[in-house]
Amino acid sequence: MVQRQLRPRGIHDERVLEAMQHVPRHEFVPLDLIDYAYDDRPLPLSDGQTISQPYIVALTLEAARIVAADIVLDVGTGSGYAAAVAAELASRVVSIERQPRLAASARDRLSRLGYTVTVIDGDGSVGWPDGAPYDAIVAAATGPSVPVAWVEQLAPAGRIVMPIGSPRGAQRLAAFTLTAAGTLREKNLGAVSFVPLVGAQAWPEQGDA
Ligand code: SAH
């Protein structure tokens, strides 16, 4: 996966590549899809959700420029895979999931595999103030814009990497850096396709744009 997919596509950060090499992705996919765990594509999870394509997880975490002392908020735990990779890179990872069943199984899986990740049940579109400030906030669900709460919970020079755009239309993966002036500077990482970020500071309950 690292040699055939991630390096050729331009992932260069050695810490990210090592973390991707280390996390057993087959532990995070449904049992009937285990043969496809390391394929170059997203896979369905329960409850209509997906585990992102490995390249997209690597691209997101590379753009988040995580260093070992960082505290990271991962919005949309899903299987817990991205949270596990983030845990290899950061000092603390908080991951938040709005579907209680997914949160519970990710919590069990992460602790069984020895990852120290705080999995919170709730609406990540409002962040999680108790763990703030975060050096990086990453999301695997698309919103109309950066939630205000995330900016408020970001440390100086913090990064936010999230898909922006309509769940059924055009989306881009965007990497933002908080400037000294308190504004966000954006870098567009290209077109992507994610499930909606459903919540108070994103799309309404049905996920309609
Ligand atoms: N990072 C995950 C991918 C999960 S897909 C992995 O590695 O497997 C996106 C997830 O975001 C879904 O599980 C969905 O339930 C969740 N989600 C959507 N809106 C949310 C919100 N407002 N707060 C928390 N989780 C949310």
Image: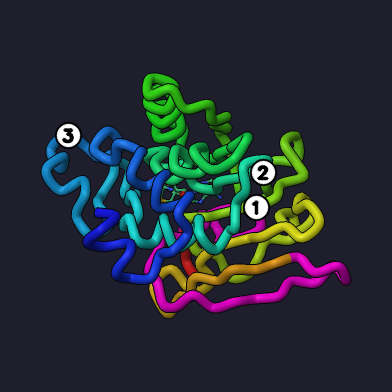
Real-space CA distance between mark 3 and mark 1, rounded to the nearest whole angstrom: 31 Å
| Residue behind mark 1 | 136
Q: What crowding class fits label 3: few (fewer than 14 Cα within 10 Å), some (14-19), or many (20 or more)?
A: few
What percent of the width, then of the height, locates residue 160? 63, 60
1 versus 122 height, above or below: below
What percent of the width, then of the height, locates residue 199? 59, 53
| Residue sticking out furthest to the top | 112
Residue at horizontal 41 percent and vertical 31 percent from the top: 106
Residue at horizontal 22 percent and vertical 37 percent from the top: 30
State how many labels appear: 3
Along the horizontal axis of the image, is 80 left or right of 177? Answer: left
Q: Which image quarter: residue 181?
A: bottom right
Which residues are the magenta region?
Answer: 178-206
Instruction: State the mark number for residue 31.
Output: 3
Label 2 sits on a secondary structure element that is loop
Residue at horizontal 47 percent and vertical 27 percent from the top: 115
Along the horizontal axis of the image, is 43 left or right of 156? Answer: left
Q: Nearer the viewer, mark 1 or mark 2?
A: 2
Label 1 sits on a secondary structure element that is strand
Viewer-nearest residue: 148 or 53? 53
- Quadrant containing the N terminus is bottom left
| Residue behind mark 2 | 70
Amino acid type, callout 2: Asp
Asked if the residues shown at circle 3 and circle 1 are in contact, with their CB atoms under 8 angstroms apart, the answer is no
Q: Nearer the viewer, mark 3 or mark 2?
A: 2
Q: What crowding class fits label 1: few (fewer than 14 Cα within 10 Å), some (14-19), or many (20 or more)?
A: many
Instruction: State the mark number for residue 186.
Output: none
